[in-house]
Image: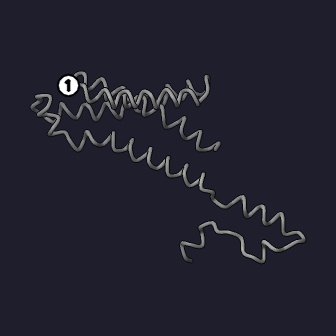
Amino acid sequence: MRITNCLPRLPSKSIQTQSTGGTSSLLARLDRILTARHVLYVFVAFMAWLTDSFNIFVVSLSLKRLSVQYGIGSLEELSLALSLTHLFRSAGAFVFGLMADRFGRRWLLTLNMLGISGTVLGTTFILDYSDFLVVRGLFAFFLGGTYGTALQFREFW
């Protein structure tokens, strides 16, 4: 079986020209065709996933440079930033999931996006390691809250 057999394609000419009973099957097939809007949604979701993954794992790739920047001798101390990122991501998913069930998802997703943007921007102005840990924890908290609300939007679009 070729992989292209699974891709949606336009109906054939014979199906398009059927006049008796063919309209329901034609409409059913047209409903299954991906539109440019669907492709755009998938692209935006992929880019969001890619940039979020980059923001999470960029710290692990630059631990040595961060140790020089903040004057920390051991990499074990810097690995605390990685642990906090994973811990606060779960906490953010839990808290924002409960809030989304109670207050709705649209404005909480907006709040999450503003929080992520603010913490990423705030990372550039950090001067010491304790502030770095706080901002990374906040970033992970907002990022964890994004997962549940974004997945629900994906389900209902």
Q: Residue at x 48, y 34 (%)?
A: 146
**Residue 137's quadrant in the figure?**
top left
Residue ranking furthest to the right: 20
Q: Residue at x 14, y 34 (%)?
A: 67
For the residue pair 84 and 126, the one nearer the viewer reads as: 126
- The crowding category of the residue bearing disc 1, from other C-alpha atoms within 10 Å (few below 14, some 14 to 19, many at least 20), is some
Q: Is residue 94 left or right of residue 16?
A: left
For the residue pair 56 and 125, the one nearer the viewer reads as: 125
Q: Is residue 83 left or right of residue 21?
A: left
Q: Label 1 amino acid?
A: Tyr
Q: Is residue 80 left or right of residue 34?
A: left
- Counting from the top left corner in percent of width and height, residue 107 is at 56, 27
Q: Residue at x 58, y 30 (%)?
A: 105
Badge 1 is on which residue?
129
Quadrant where the C terminus lies? top right
- Counting from the top left corner in percent of width and height, residue 37 is at 60, 51
**Residue 134's quadrant in the figure?**
top left
- Picture layout, residue 46 above or below residue 3: above
- Counting from the top left corner in percent of width and height, residue 120 is at 34, 32
Q: Is residue 34 left or right of residue 11?
A: left
Its colouring scheme is one colour
- Picture layout, residue 83 above or below residue 24: above
- Counting from the top left corner in percent of width and height, residue 88 is at 38, 29
Determine the secondary structure under disc 1. Answer: helix
Quadrant where the N terminus lies? bottom right
- Picture layout, residue 50 above or below residue 129: below
**Residue 139's quadrant in the figure?**
top left
Q: Residue at x 72, y 75 (%)?
A: 12
Say how many tags the image has: 1
